[in-house]
Each structure stands twice: as C-alpha cells, then as structure tokens.
Image (tube, grey):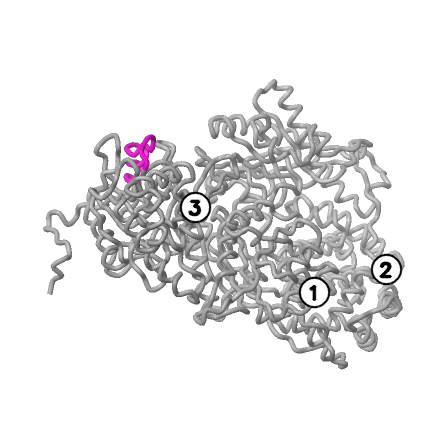
Amino acid sequence: MMDKNKRTYSSNKIHRENVVQFHIVDNLVKKQGYYHRSKDDYDRSSAIDKVLVIKFIKATQSDEWKRLEEQYTVAAETEFFKQLEKALTQRGTLDVLRQGIKLIPGIKFSLCFFKPASGLNKNLQKLFDANILSVIDELEYSIKNENRIDIGFFLNGIPLATMECKNQSTGTTFKNAENQYRKDRAPAGEPLLTFKRGALVHFAVDEDNVSMTTRLNNGKTRFLPFNRGHNGGAGNPDIDDEFRIAYLYKNLPDCQAVLSREILLDIVGRFMHFDSSDGKDLIIFPRFQQLDAVFKLMNHARKNGTGHSYLIQHSAGSGKSNTIGWTAHRMITLHNDKDEPIFDTAIIVTDRVVLDRQLQNTVAQFEQTRGVVKKIDGSSRQLKEAIQQGARIIVTTVHKFSTEHLKEISGQSKRRFAVLIDEAHGSQSGSHADNLAKALSRDNENTSSDIEDIIADYQRQRGPQANISYFAFTATPRNVTLERFGTKGPDGLPHPFHLYSMRQAIEEGFILDVLQNYMTYKTYYQLEKAIENDPQLEGRKAQRRVARFATLHPTAIVQKVEVIVEHFLRHVSKELEGNGKAMVVTQSRIQALKYFQAIKKYIEDKKYQGIRPLVAFSGELYVDGEIYTEAQLNNFSETELPERFDGSEYQLLIVAEKYQTGFDQPKLCAMYVDRKLDGLQAVQTLSRLNRTYPGKTRTFILDFQNTIEDIQNAFKPYFEATHIEDISDPNQIYELEGRIKSFSIVDENEINSFSEIYFRSQLESQDRIFLEKLVRNAVQRFNYEEDEGKQEEFRQLLKSYMRFYSFVAQVMRLEDTGLEKLYAYVSWLSRLLPNREIPAEIEITEDMLRLQAFRLERKEQGSASLSTGSTIPLTPIREFGAKSYSEDEERSLSEIINNFNQRHGTQFTKDDFLRFEQVNHEILHNEDLRDMLSNNPPDVVYSAFSQAFFEGAIRLFQRDNQLQNIVMTDSIARNQAIKHFFNRAINEIHLSKRVY
C-alpha cells in the first residue's frame, strides 16, 4: 500500500531539482527525527526559530526559566532573545552552542547538550536526546529581499547549516550551487549568512556530489569537496536504491548519516573549531575522510580494545594534523559497551628532533578542558613526569623515549595508551620505537633470578603490547611501516586501515599534481688532463673529485643558471599575480653555493629586476680558504628564512639537504632539480610544490639529473593505496645471525658472559669495565682481519641485524633469548669497532684538468602524471649487507677467468680472481666514489671508475708480479675485467637503494 504521507510526482516533474531537495528533507524528518518547520517559523532579523528555542529551554531547563521569569516577569522572553542575539553576534554560533549564555542574576542557559562519553549518567543522556533538530525548505532568509535557500538546518532553533540543491537532469550540478552562493548569497547584513554569527557550514549538492564552505565571501568563497571517494579517486560510489549523496541523510551499513543527531552534534561539539593561527579567521569543519577515519578508529577500538595497530595513509593536503588531534581527543574519552574507559593516555609522537610546533598547537587548540594537553617542549624529565602523573594527552618526539629518564619508568603495564605517530617512517620501527614500547609496558623490577627469564622479558617488551594501540599516520608508508602497522587483509598481506590517496587529493583539488609539467635535461661533458704527470690524481678520491670538478665547473653551472633564470622569468614569475616562487635542489653544499653565486651574478649582468635568490644549507662551508654560512650569505639568521622567503623580496630558494621535507610554502610554483632523486626522497622533495594557493593551478619542474620514468616509478607506490608484494621473512634474522658468527669475530661464550652482566637490573662501574673488556676481545679479532672489504661487510651485517631484529621483534613474539643476547652484544660491538679509514680529500684544479666540451640538451617535456591503476607494490625486506654473485655475474666472471687463462697460459681460479672484489669494496665503500656512481649516468662515470679500479688493482697485486703484469700490459683483458666489476658496482648501487 502506498504511504499517504510520501510525496509523489508526475512523470514530467520527477526530473526537477526540488525532487532531490524534498527527498533529503523527507528522509531527515522520517528517519533522523528532524522537525519539519515552515518558513513562517523563521525570524529573519535574528536567523532563529524562536518557538523551538523556547521549547528546548523550557523542556530541559525549566528551573532556570522560572528564575528568569521571576527576575524579568513579562519581559523574560524579550530579554532572553536580546542576550542570545547579542551573544551570537559577539561570540559566534559555535561558542554559544558549546558554552551557552548567562543573564543577570547568574542564570546560565545551555543551548545544546552534547552526547556524554559514557552512559553512566542517565540524566546527561536524556538531555542529549532532548536536543531538537529541525529543517526548513525554501527558506526565505533575507532581510533585504525575498531570496530563498533550498534548505536550512537548525539545532534547538539556532542556525547550523544551509544547503543549495541542484539536479543533473536539468543540466545543473553542485558547481552551479557553489556559484549561486558566490553570486546571489551575499553575506553582508544577512544574519544567517554572516561568518561566525550565522550558520556554521554551507553545502552545495547535486545527486552525486557534495561540497561545503564555512565562510561565504562572495566571489572569493572557497568550497571544499565533502565526498566519500570512489575507487581510490574523487567522487562518490553508487548506493543501492539511493542517490550517491545518501550518506548525508541516511544511515548506511558502513557509516552513520552525517546529518544524524549523533554525528552532527559530535561535529559541532568535538570537531569544529575556530582558527586564526595564520592571521585569517577560519571555522574548521572536518572533511569527510577525516570524519570517516576518526569514527572508524573509534568504533574498532571500542569493539576490540587496546593492543592493535592502525595505519592511516592520508595524502599530503589531507589535514593530517587535525585528524591526529581529533583522534587523540576522542581516544581519551572513548568507552566500551560496558562504559569502561579504553585508554588512559594518548601520546602523540613525531620523529622530528625539533617538535613540530604546528602539530603541538593544532592538538592544543582542540582542548576544551584546560590542562588536558601536555606539550613536551623541554627535557625528557618533563616527559617522564607527564607519563607518571597520568597526563591525558602528551605531545613529544620519539627520541625522548631513548633517554635515561625514560628508562627509569616502570609499572605502566596496567595503564592503557593510544600512541599516535606523525609521519610513521623508519624511525618508528627502530630502537626509539623499542624504547617507547618498553617505557609504556615495563612492569616493576623483574624479581626473577634466572637470567633467561629476565632476557625473555626484555624481548617481550619489544613485541606487541596488550596495553598499547598504535595509530600511525603517513602519506608515504615504507615497507617496514606497512608490515609494522598495517591491517592484515584476506590475502594475508598488510594494508592501510584507512586511505585517503594522493590520487583522490589531487582529483579533489586539495593538492596539485606536481608531475603535470615535467621537463628533463641531459648534460654532456668531456674532460682532458692539462698536465701529463700529476701525482695528486693517483689518490683514492681523485676520480670522485674529477666528476665533481665537471659538475661544479663554471661553464656547467652558468649554462644551467641561464636555463633556470630565463625559465623562471618567462613562466613562473607571473604566477600568483607576480608572487610565484621556485626552489633549486642541489646535490651538495658547495654546489648550492656555486649556484647562489652564479645566479646572483647572472641577474646582475642582465640587470634583471624582481628576482632575488636565497640559499639554505647547514653548518660552515670552507671553499678556497673562505668560510661561508647560510646566515652570512643571506644577511639574516637561519630562523628568519621561511618568513623572509614568504615575503615579496625573494623568489628563488637554493637548497642542499634542507627544506626538501616538511617545508610548507604554498607559493612555490617551480622546482629546478640538479641532484639524483630516488624513491621516497623524490616524492618528499617534489611534493614541496603540491600545496594549493589562490590562483595556483599548475607547477613546473626542470630536472637536470633524472628521467621522467625515474620519477614516475618513485611516485607509483604512493599514488593510490600503498601495498606490498609479500611480507618479509622473519627467518632472515637467523640468516643474519649465522653470517655474523661465520666471521669468527664474535664468540658465543663471550656473548653469554656479556648477557649475564648486561641484563642485571642494577650495574656498577666495574661491570662497565668488564663488559667493554669482553667486547674488545671481538674488536681485537676484527683488527686481525686484513681484508678491508671483509671488515666493512661485518660492520654492515651488524647494522642490518640490529635494524631487522628491532623490526621483527616489534611485529611478533620471537621467544628466542639468543637473538636478544646477540642484539645487546653487537649494539656495543658496533660502537667500539674502528671506523673505516678515509683518505684526505684531493682538490682538483683547472691547472690539472680542462673542460674540453660541455653541452646541455633538453630531452623530455610534457606530463609525467600518473593514471589510475599505475601503482606498483613495495618489496619486502630481502637484502642485507654485502651481496653474493648473481647467476649472470657468475657466468660473466667465468668467461673473464677463461679468457685470462687462455691468453696468458695461467691457471687462475675463481677464488684467485675474486680478489678483484676487494677493489670493488674499496670503491663502493668510499663515500665520494659511491656518490659519483649513484648520481651520474654510467657513460659519464665509467672512465673515472676504470681509473680507480686500475689503480686499486695495482695496489692489490703489487706482490703478485704475474697478475700485475697482465693487468698492466693486456688492455683487452683488463677492460673486460673492469667492465664486469663496473656493472657489478652499478647493480649494487641500485640494489642498495632498496636494501633495508
């Protein structure tokens, strides 16, 4: 039977836009308990439904109303609305709803009652239920004319929201609704539309999409998408038998309606806030993915309690700091179905050494009860006291958990912690994270006398803790981040618990696609020796200096500078009404200095106006007997640079390992890259361009070092949901253990003796002496190893073991105290091992070398933007330390050995020939030579590698006359060997960028 109260439409009217409007209203009234009010119930001058205000006040605060009537008699209602309108004008709607109003003599009225954190107080629940939500369609709001807004939403008669509805069937969309707000909904003199004073949020909708704004400002009004996302991108998914925007007004299986009583009042009471931190007054209304993430985290924690890990992969531009702040505040008030609190304390940690002030301030501004948030901006003692005193929300750096003060904390295992991690990367799976878990789960002193029990307890503290839940936030999770914090899916692999992808952020306009305009250049140069015999060129670092000489040569710098400056003036300087800025990314401090000097000179020579550079690098730089610092070159302190660069005086920022991550300058429109970028570093560096700014619609990248394919491959793992092709095999820890012990440097008895002392609860200075004595036995055996390559391999193995053990122990229970003993032992050993000797640097001058030819050629130009489905998976941890030969390399090596033997009548074996590998070790563990191989094309660096290998081989075989003669005299055999080991070196460089 047809519902008599249901609206019906004729076939020639069913397509009209008011069908969408009425459908929303009907659902709110019938399913969400809204009152359906008439436009005549609305008072235009105050923007209030006065009848509902009085109805709510008398129903919930009758005693206060009686006091008011006793004080003001027949003028009580008039005085009440006079003070209410005054409070709305002076303090704003949000504050009035949260704090209420007061009238003489000390009569306080609440204008809203928010849902209590628990159900223990039944009276508070009744007051929450007494809130009156209402809706008026075709709302005639204006005090100037007869303008109408499609729908007005009210809470206890106070305006909450407005909505303009459009209909694609009649050729209009939510974009038309946005323009209607901009052009026909002028806020001046209109109480309903006045910022702060009137409705808190304004929605523009059609059947498929929703956008919103909290401030109407005529043509400058900025709307933000409020969509759920669809298939990893923008938009909304289909909903059975409903419009795609039904999540606004209808409860769905995976989310409650945004406009439902529970969600809407939660947004008003606990999410929305007034922000004036950047000098502009804003009301923050959470975006959909922020709401969705917080509520889904709450629901899972409410149902499953503590002891879980969550990875929230939210793109840059997603408002991550706000999401972290909201999550922290909600977790400390979260109760389960038995009305028991789930968490005692929320700890927000970042891996920045200097605590992110923006994050601190964001979390603190959500604080509605003074003292809830404790910002640890002092010593680790301050953190220790905050934990021991039971602070509700703590904001700190993860490094403070590795200090002695935190190691003294115990007895926290009965308390429950929500640990929220900002930018969860590698440091959150290492020793700092270990120490965090120990501090929050360590019981009072272990009284067992069995050393094995004590060590097992140490190992247990590294692993998952029942009293700690981790909430890890990042836009770019690494493989270890996914494995440590991801949620296991049906495929058995870890996945993000919640996703707001880079792709969706780009499509929704929250960030820009930095790959949209990408241009690459290739450099060609030819060097010749200026003098025949120069002994300085025979040093170990000479070849690296040769490559540096070429890249820093004035000819090379000047040609690139010309490209940079002319491109900036032609394409970038006019952006943002003449406020466009650019960054030059260099590979070293000295290159940054050379660029800075060359750009200044080029600008002066050309007499250009409106372009001035700044330079950024750390520490003091010594060049040609002169000392340079960033502050000296810029003529102001380092701390002033961000603010100075934001002004109109400077346009170019030249950087070397500084401001490439975490630097938020939305006026950056271009980047000039003259360094090799790889993987996550490429994404983080180029993402400095993605911030939005009024009028900013495009970005430019000119790249002198990388190809478009290189950059696309770096971005692909993070464009949509990051996934991993397989999980790391934890049994690799035993492979590492075996490789370490195979060196005969560590001794099992010494490890056990070390552990007997080390794991005692209280140690004395004499114990320190004994521990070092044990470890120095291994150091002595290490020094007996004459092969420097083997020594370096051993150093790498120790580091790999410590990293991988720390990671695996956090992910699972290992129940093998031998691994914990070895970890403690090698942690000491790695600190006491002598460092690899590094020869003095060699200065290459123009007297020694000549740049015979240089050419800069544009190679690729166009869009490098990624398309849907182009994501590639991350690889698990598979490689550690030194590499063994691959099958192809074995075959290549065999061919070389055979050629040598055939040509010279010798019987060299593979083992004999593998002594060449020591030369490769020498090259690859030389920082400068390794940088040369890593940051230059093979055709450019082969000559320098060949010279380094040749000289290394002479040194290696100086006592082997037969092989030395072959190397010296047979150029064919020598070149064959050099090419083999060159390819092997290049392969190792590429592999090392993926090695854990």
Kindly identify which residue carries mark 3: 106
Residue 882 seen from this side? no
Q: Amino acid at mark 2?
A: Gln
Residue shown at 52% from the left, 47% from the top? 365
Q: Amino acid at mark 3?
A: Gly
Question: Which of labels 1 and 2 is toward the front?
Answer: 1
**As drawn, which residue projects farthest toward the top?**
607
Graded by Cα atoms within 10 Å as few (under 14), some (14 to 19) or many (20 or more), the crowding at tag 3 reads few
On the image, the x and y values in percent for residue 293 come to 45, 57
660 lies above or below 752? above
* Marked residue nearer the N-terminal end (1 or 3): 3
Question: Which of labels 1 and 3 is toward the front?
Answer: 3
Q: Nearer the viewer, residue 44 or 318?
A: 44
* Marked residue nearer the N-terminal end (1 or 2): 1
On the image, the x and y values in percent for residue 839 come to 84, 48
Residue 38 seen from this side? yes
Q: Nearer the viewer, residue 830 or 527?
A: 830
Tell me the SS state at disc 1.
loop
Tell me the SS state at disc 2.
helix
Specify start and end residues of the magenta stretch as a single range: 174-191
* Marked residue nearer the N-terminal end (2 or 3): 3
Kindly identify which residue carries mark 2: 962
On the image, the x and y values in percent for residue 331 come to 50, 60
641 lies above or below 948? above
Magenta region, mostly helix, strand or loop? helix
Kindly identify which residue carries mark 1: 409
Whole-number angstrom distance, CA of label 1 to CA of label 2: 65 Å
User: Residue 177 in magenta?
Assistant: yes
Q: Are marks 1 and 2 in contact (CB under 8 Å)?
A: no
